[in-house]
Amino acid sequence: MTDSQPGPDADAVELAHTLFDGARAGDSGLLGRYLEAGAPATLTNAAGDSLLMLAAYHGHADTVRLLLGHGADANAVNDRGQTPLAGAVFKGYPDVAKVLLDAGADPDAGTPSARAAAEMFARKDILELLG
């Protein structure tokens, strides 16, 4: 990067890291404050992982619910074609899967799909949720 090409604002980058860390940790209080102040619930990192993907992958059903309530897309795929539902299935979080399904997550979207992941990892409890 040269001096003539501005880089990302350091404060914005720091805020993004704070939000991604909050999603991973399930810090709904922190995320809720920033979402109410206008932070986008659809924010993604360099790998295309949304706040919702990170919260789902780390098993935080309440945080998933919060993000969905602020406009996060239950079917958004990351750069590898994975959905938040598939992430929750892979990690074995039926409570998160239920929240996502109730919000309209498609069990057949993504690669691998949540249904395929549930079959692959013998997540019988989640397969029942998928119908």
Image (cartoon, helix red, strand yellow):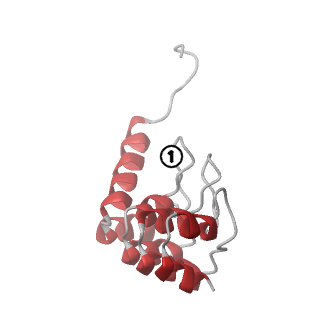
Residue 51 in picture, x, y percent from top left: 47, 59
Q: In the image shown, does 99 or 18 lie closer to the viewer?
A: 99
Q: How many tags in the picture? A: 1
Which residue shows up at 62% across the image and 46% down it?
79
Residue 40 in picture, x, y percent from top left: 52, 61
Q: In the image shown, does 32 or 115 lie closer to the viewer?
A: 115
Which residue shows up at 52% across the image and 75% down it?
68
Q: Is residue 131 left or right of residue 61?
A: right
Identity of the residue furthest to the top in this view: 2
Q: In the image shown, does 63 or 86 lie closer to the viewer?
A: 86
Q: Is residue 106 left or right of residue 69?
A: right
Secondary structure type for disc 1: loop
Which residue shows up at 38% across the image and 61% down it?
23
Circle 1 packing at 10 Å, graded few (<14), some (14-19), many (20+), is some
Residue 7 in picture, x, y percent from top left: 51, 28
Q: As displayed, is residue 28 above or below residue 9? A: below
Q: In the image shown, does 62 or 121 lie closer to the viewer?
A: 121
The amino acid beneath tag 1 is: Asn
Q: Quadrant of residue 118?
A: bottom right
Q: As displayed, is residue 2 above or below residue 101? A: above
Quarter of the image that includes the C terminus:
bottom right
Q: Quadrant of residue 129?
A: bottom right
Residue 122 in picture, x, y percent from top left: 50, 70
Q: As displayed, is residue 5 above or below residue 44? A: above
Q: As displayed, is residue 69 above or below residue 56? A: below
Q: Is residue 69 visible?
A: no
Q: Which residue is mark 1?
A: 45
Q: Is residue 9 visible?
A: yes
